[in-house]
Image (spheres, rainbow, N blue to C red):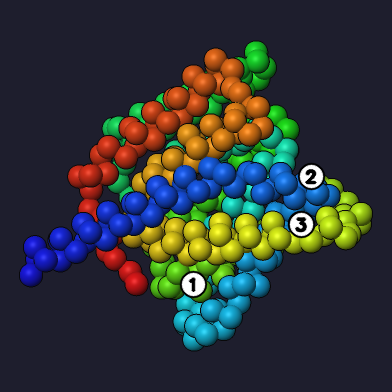
Amino acid sequence: MADLKGDAGRRTALIASLIVVGTGALWGFYWYPVRRLDALGLSGAWGSLAIVASAAVLLLPLAVMRRERLARAGFPALASIAIGGAAFAFYSVGFVYGRVAIIILLFFLTPVWSTLIGRFVMGWPITGLRIAAIGVGLAGLGVMLGAEGEIPIPRGTGEWLALVSGILWSISTTGMRANAPLGPAESAFVFAFGASVGALLLAPTLEPFPTGIGGDKFVVAFGWAVFAGALWWGLSMAALIWAASRLEPARVGILLMAEVLIGALSAAWLAGEALGTLELAGGALVLIAGILEIWPSKEEPQPSSVR
């Protein structure tokens, strides 16, 4: 019986890991609809708000069907998922104001923040390799942000939003690991709702309300918003939330790194954005930190499965 449970647990972990990798690859193209909406007149956070609000509306019927689960869920669980939505909303808006690869790499410092939160807030164990991962990750951050000879701190709205989004996502995944009573569908709704609140708070502070969208532009913008909301925030988020509750928070951040490669290549191909030598070196250190971080987790007990 123990072996059967062990096999089932390994299969679940494998499926969850594959879902996270696939989600990361898909999100490597997410910057494109965000920038399309910006070009159509939904500037700043307004385009991201249109996307996440569309997702929330699409997921609302499923949330109503599962309202009893939502009612039974505790505040920590709902807050953890909503914070994750706000994190991704900040990340989404960052693409409007910064270069795609830099925004993605700043977000992917999540293993550093997840490890620190797990150790000092949750009391989870930390190994020597994870300490090394923190050091390498922060070194990569410094090299990447100081590539032009300036003080190595985020510059511009996009980079700050990306850094904050990574920290918020680490808080969210830690909370989802500790409190995961919701199923994927209702979780995705709470996620989209949290993102809508986050984007709504950001939108009027960054850009004025868009007033010049009408006719064909409105139809195209509406189509992009619904498409992105359904695919990225509906389907992929439901799958990611299911997987994240079954894996360590840092592992989730690392497996999502497929987004780094896909995002950098797609931005270079479609937007002509290329990184300098030092920026590439800093990004490589961030990825190495992820590899160092995940290595010892193979020997650590996995969290118990949740539905």
The residue that label 3 is drawn on is 220
Position in image of residue 46 (x %, y %): 77, 54
- Going from the N terminus, do you reach mark 3 or mark 2 first? 2
| Badge 3 density bin: few <14, some 14–19, many ≥20, Cα 10 Å | some
Report how far apart the C-alphas of labels 3 and 2 lie in the structure: 11 Å
Report how far apart the C-alphas of labels 3 and 1 lie in the structure: 27 Å
Q: Nearer the viewer, residue 101 or 289?
A: 101
Position in image of residue 242 (x %, y %): 40, 64
Q: Nearer the viewer, residue 78 or 213?
A: 213
Residue 91 appears in view: no
Residue shown at 80% from the left, 49% from the top? 40
Position in image of residue 280 (x %, y %): 52, 21
Quadrant for the N terminus in the image: bottom left
Task: Give the image quarter of residue 227.
Answer: bottom right
The residue that label 1 is drawn on is 185
Left or right position of 302 against 76:
left
